[in-house]
Image: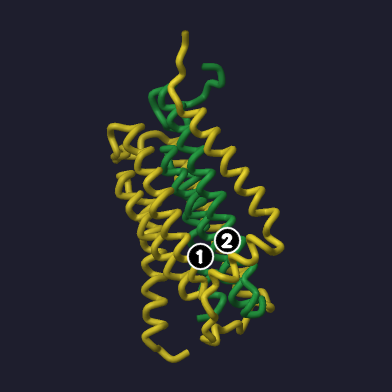
């Protein structure tokens, strides 16, 4: 693989995604973690662009960065006056939890790496750089007039149910 | 770029999300971990759609879009539950919320 501008940008996005995801799970201030999450989501959107998934990248930016992240920030600001988590690790239980979580996560990562490296069908699949036409029209056809019509309707009902449920759960209870 | 590049990035995101879910002591941080996991999953769908199936087949991308919709619904319900819990307990540390009856 020759080192072109495209690969340079790809590694930039990859580094951005991974580094900011690392910040999300390590930084103590929740608001900082939320903004790192924003960088991660933008990085994933950039990777979608490299996968020629233009509509998916736009959806990622609109829904995640514009919707979910704002929701998370609202949640942070409505629930806790103090954003910093305590500096020193207090109890033995907490230290044990950190250690155990780290071991489990590391073991899982090693397992995934082994699978990725050793599956024969996934080897030598190189992006040949063919450019696809924009996918939006095709996705619209698939969803509104194709085989994904039923899942589309189901997921819209699910979204409605979830939003009504969320409004019901979070409202103040009026007792009379 | 090969498929494995994307799979490794996705594996890193997934692992970090699992780590956050297991070790964070604040419900909103746990939600961020879940979002990382869902993102890694969607990235996998898009990557396999690009590399494994023929190039005019975009079913994987459509599944990823459904995944984003589900993530949005999940985040809304999660935050509603967090608000209700905060009103009831005055805290959103998961280990302090240990009674079912209000």
Chain for colour green: B
Local secondary structure at mark 2: helix
Q: Is residue B51 above or below residue A161?
A: below
Dot 1: chain letter: A
In the image, what residue occupies the spot 33% across and 44% down? A30
- Judging by the rendered image, the residue that carries numbered circle 2 is B64
In the image, what residue occupies the spot 52% across and 24% down? B98
Q: Is residue A155 above or below residue A134?
A: above
Front one among B11 and B58? B58
Local secondary structure at mark 1: helix
Do the residues bearing badges 1 and 2 touch, measured as CB atoms within 8 Å?
A: yes
- Residue A161: image location, x then y, percent: 59, 38
- Judging by the rendered image, the residue that carries numbered circle 1 is A56
Q: Colour of chain A?
A: yellow
Q: Is residue A161 above or below residue B57?
A: above
- Residue A52: image location, x then y, percent: 51, 75
Front one among A95 and A70? A70
- Residue A143: image location, x then y, percent: 63, 61
Discs 1 and 2 carry the same chain letter: no
Dot 2: chain letter: B
A158 lies left or right of A103: right
A35 lies left or right of B94: left
In the image, what residue occupies the spot 61% across and 69% down? A114
In the image, what residue occupies the spot 31% across and 45% down? A31
Q: Which mark is residue B44?
A: none
- Residue A107: image location, x then y, percent: 56, 58
Q: Quadrant of residue A109?
A: bottom right
Q: How packed is label 1: few (under 14 Cα within 10 Å), some, or many (20 or more)?
A: many
Query: What is the C-alpha distance between the residues marked 1 and 2?
Result: 8 Å
């Amino acid at each position: 693989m020759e080192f072109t501008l495209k690969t340079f940008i790809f590694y930039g996005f990859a580094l951005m995604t991974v580094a900011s995801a690392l910040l999300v799970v390590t930084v103590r201030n929740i608001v900082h973690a939320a903004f790192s999450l924003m960088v991660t989501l933008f990085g994933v959107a950039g990777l979608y662009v490299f996968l020629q998934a233009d509509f998916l990248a736009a959806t990622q930016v609109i829904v995640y960065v514009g919707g979910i992240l704002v929701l998370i920030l609202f949640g942070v600001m409505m629930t806790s006056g103090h954003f910093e988590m305590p500096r020193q690790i207090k109890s033995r239980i907490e230290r044990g939890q950190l250690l155990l979580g780290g071991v489990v996560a590391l073991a899982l990562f090693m397992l995934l790496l082994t699978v990725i490296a050793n599956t024969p069908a996934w080897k030598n699949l190189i992006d040949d750089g063919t450019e696809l036409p924009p996918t939006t029209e095709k996705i619209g056809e698939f969803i509104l007039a194709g085989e994904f019509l039923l899942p589309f309707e189901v997921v819209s009902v699910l979204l409605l149910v979830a939003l009504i449920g969320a409004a019901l759960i979070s409202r103040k209870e009026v007792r009379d | 770029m090969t498929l494995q590049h994307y799979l490794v990035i996705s594996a890193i995101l997934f692992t970090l999300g699992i780590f956050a879910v297991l070790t964070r002591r604040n419900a909103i941080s746990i939600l961020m971990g879940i979002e990382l996991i869902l993102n890694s999953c969607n990235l996998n769908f898009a990557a396999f759609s690009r590399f494994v199936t023929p190039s005019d087949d975009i079913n994987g991308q459509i599944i990823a879009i459904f995944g984003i919709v589900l993530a949005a619904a999940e985040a809304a319900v999660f935050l509603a539950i967090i608000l209700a819990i905060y009103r009831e307990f005055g805290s959103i540390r998961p280990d302090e919320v240990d009674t079912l009856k209000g």
